[in-house]
Amino acid sequence: MEIFLFSFNAIAPILFIMALGWFIAWRGHIGEEDKLFLNKLCFKYLLPFQLFCSTVSIDFYAEFNSKMVIFCISAILALAFIGFCLFTLTMKDRHKRCIFIVCAFRSNNIIYALPLAINMFGDAGLKAAAMLVPITIIMFNLLSVIAFVYYSQNADTDIGTALKHTLIDICKNPLITSSVLGIVMSLLGVSIPQFLEKGVFTVGALGPPMALLLLGSQIDLKKLTGNIKPVLGLCLMRLVIVPAVIAPFMVYFGFRGAHLGALFVAFAAPCAVTNMIMARMYNVAPEFSAQSVYLTTVLSLATMFCGISLFRWLGLF
């Protein structure tokens, strides 16, 4: 019962907020323009405030876990390489192959995994997950651009030009700049002025629930027709096979508690919403990419519950 309650209490808030977002959209109370506006609000202001608050609160001299960061980088590169080799040999459709490769290494770490880490471990989970955010943003974007440009037949730019623009976008990304600012302030021992502290932390707290609400509002299972078998195969790969392969290495290298939780949810999270945007941009199976995001998001609630329960039962959480 304790294992069940721990897992349920981690998943239930995410399920509730996403279901509320879906219900609001289903009732027609939020349109596409509203979603666009709220997405900009969330990613340019609310989530950056959240990441700044979490990183500025970390004592990097005492709490920074270099082993976790190195493991994260190595695992992402390994998944990208294995995915490229495996799906090049087994899939004939180049565009769907690209989506499979990207989904092998890229997860919805910001919107989905970060709130889940907070639900499980509170402030410790937030700090552990926040350390991975700059790494995942940079690597996910760079590797995804390489994949989409390589597999796109209609791309107007080559890989070099696309990577150049991506690097510029990364440097201007508010999630990166807010994380870096928080890290620098923490390392220098600079604290938030008292008269601003409560306001900054209050705005930051709005980020994760708003992101989950928007994620739920974008789920449209009616669009699954036509690709159900490959989408289910992608779900199996993203939600079961990848976590099952990576998790034993996490345990072997000694990760426990909040650090293990942050790594697990980062690699077991559903497909990133950004995949849909990039698939449309490069005209690489945009419908299939959207379907993979919708279904993995829904099914991840069950797979995450099972994974968290297993780690709790083993005494690792």
Image: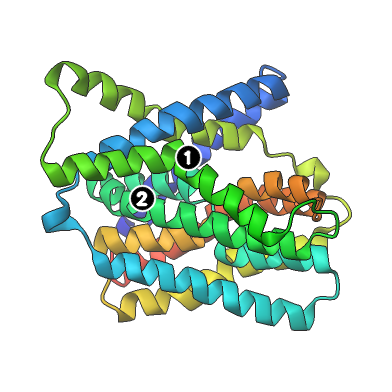
Q: Position of residue 167 (x, y in %)?
A: 52, 51
- Rendered view: 277 above or below 161: above
> Which element carries disc 2, helix, strand or loop?
helix
User: Which image quadrant is residue 13 in?
Assistant: top left
**Sequence-wise, which precedes: disc 2 or disc 1?**
2
Estimate the spatial distance between the alpha carbons at disc 2 and disc 1, rounded to whole Å: 23 Å
- 297 sits to left or right of 225: left
User: Which of the numbered marks, if any, corresponds to residue 117?
Assistant: 2
The answer to whether one can see residue 99 in this image is no
Residue type at tag 2: Ala
Closer mark to the observer between disc 2 and disc 1: 1
| Residue 54: x %, y % from top left | 27, 41
Q: Residue at (77%, 45%) from the top-left corner?
A: 280
Q: Is residue 223 left or right of residue 270?
A: right
- Pointer 1: what residue? 173
Q: Which residue corresponds to the image point at 29% horizontal and 50% vertical from the top-left?
A: 125
- For the C terminus, the quadrant is bottom left
Q: Residue 103, percent across and down?
A: 63, 62
Res. 34 in view: yes
Instruction: Answer few, some or many: residues within 10 Å of disc 1's Cα (few below 14, many 20 plus, some between 14 and 19).
Output: some
Question: Residue type at mark 1?
Answer: Asn
